[in-house]
Amino acid sequence: NAGVTQTPKFQVLKTGQSMTLQCAQDMNHNSMYWYRQDPGMGLRLIYYSASEGTTDKGEVPNGYNVSRLNKREFSLRLESAAPSQTSVYFCASMIGGASYEQYFGPGTRLTVT
Amino acid sequence: QQQVKQSPQSLIVQKGGISIINCAYENTAFDYFPWYQQFPGKGPALLIAIRPDVSEKKEGRFTISFNKSAKQFSLHIMDSQPGDSATYFCAATDSGSARQLTFGSGTQLTVLP
């Protein structure tokens, strides 16, 4: 099992450009999450999908959109990138039920100039 | 609003020493308190977790101490090793929030050989 995979690993965008970060998991997990990590601020939840077909806003959703394409895939889209969105983005998944453990991907380092 | 406060921001310990990281939370609905370990360039990985019905949980050299009345919990790393050098995040969640994790700001631990 590959676990949680993310593409791309690195990306540089100019202000105003758009892009989609891809996330996939092969563990048959029900819930998926997108976080951003900034120095001194821990990880903050952007959006999550508790189950296939549902998505909800997290703590910092402004400037982002998500799509739960199917049970395996959860993408994060930046429609018009801003320098404030320079960050490391992590996708995570959780099986749900009695388990609270979230499994994280390796991250995407995004720089917006 | 930071609901989980973590300290210290950085910690340097000699090999064989005890590393202690503290967290405090505000939301009394939280019912699951995990600690995540993150190495440079990697995603966070679950290290150990506790529920509020116990005051302590030990797994090898890692122990969580939990004080429900004070709304505080801490991670103790006994016999710290250079391989423990990483960033540690405390987190909290509750069963009614689609298991969204609220993270502390992180502690960068360096264990000197």
Image (cartoon, coloured by chain):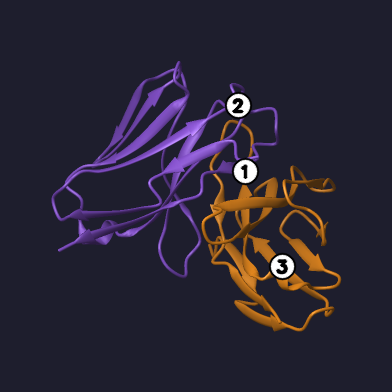
Chain colours: A orange, B purple
Q: Amino acid at mark 1?
A: Ile
The image quadrant of residue A79 is bottom right
Residue found at x 69% / y 27%: B96
Q: Does the residue at mark 2 contact the one at mark 1 (Cβ under 8 Å)?
A: no
Q: Amino acid at mark 3?
A: Ser
CA distance for labels 3 and 2: 28 Å
Asked whether the residues under marks 3 and 1 belong to the same chain, the reply is yes
Rendered-image quadrant of the N terminus of chain B:
top right
Q: Secondary structure at mark 1?
A: loop
Residue found at x 40% / y 63%: B39
Chain bearing mark 3? A
CA distance for labels 3 and 1: 32 Å
Chain bearing mark 2? B
**Is residue B87 shown left or right of residue A89?**
left
Nearer-the-camera pick, A17 or A15: A15
Q: Amino acid at mark 2?
A: Asn
* Mark 1 Cα shell of 10 Å, populated few (<14), some (14-19), many (≥20): some
Nearer-the-camera pick, B110 or A9: B110
Q: Position of residue B70 (x, y in %)?
A: 44, 20
Residue, disc 3:
A84
Residue found at x 79% / y 47%: A57
Q: Say if residue A37 shows up in the picture.
A: yes
Chain bearing mark 1? A
Q: Position of residue A54 (x, y in %)?
A: 83, 45
The image quadrant of residue A50 is top right
Nearer-the-camera pick, A79 or A3: A79
Q: Secondary structure at mark 3?
A: helix
CA distance for labels 2 and 1: 24 Å
Residue, disc 2:
B27
Residue, disc 1:
A95
The image quadrant of residue B38 is bottom left
